[in-house]
Image (cartoon, grey):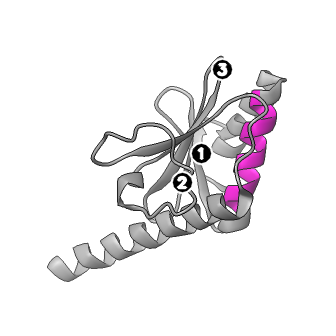
Amino acid sequence: MKAKDMSGNESASRLIDERIASLADWRGETLARMRMLIHEADPEVVETWKWMGTPVWEHGGIICTGETYKAKVKLTFAKGASLKDPSELFNSSLDGNVRRAIDIGEGEEVDADAFKALVRAAIALNASRGKAAKRAK
């Protein structure tokens, strides 16, 4: 796993590991599973730690964040409104112009293949926007 150093000697990956361990319930298991799927979809993903303790996965820009709340794990895709979601995984933040999120409650499962497809689509979108910016210069 690649990680940017975001906290002195601790890497972002280590901080995410600690967050998962500290949850010690279904939320930790869910966040760990989604993290694993992100890495399966993109072995080159970079883990960062931002906004006072939010795990973030990046590749050419932010793919998604992973937040935990009392009753859900929320994966927010930074440019989710621009992504096709044929499996209709997005179930939160649907009214916004930019972001879309997947809220996962206790006992809920997210389709692994559909989720990995969203991750890959987010990476492709980041890459295409980067190329468009370079052409505009």
CA separation in Å, label 3 and label 2: 21 Å
Q: Is residue 65 magenta?
A: no
Q: Residue at x 54, y 54 (%)?
A: 88
Farthest residue, direction left: 137
Q: Does the magenta stretch include residue 37?
A: yes
Residue 1 visible at all: no
Label number found at residue 87: none
Residue wearing tag 2:
88
Image quadrant in which you'd find residue 108: top right
Pair 3/2: label in front: 2
- SS at badge 2: loop
Above or below 53: residue 38: below
Q: Where is residue 45 in the image (x, y as percent from the top left)?
A: 61, 62
Residue wearing tag 3:
71
Q: Which residue is drawn at 23% across and 73% down?
A: 133
Sooner in the amino-acid sequence: mark 3 or mark 2: 3
Closer to us: 114 or 56 = 114
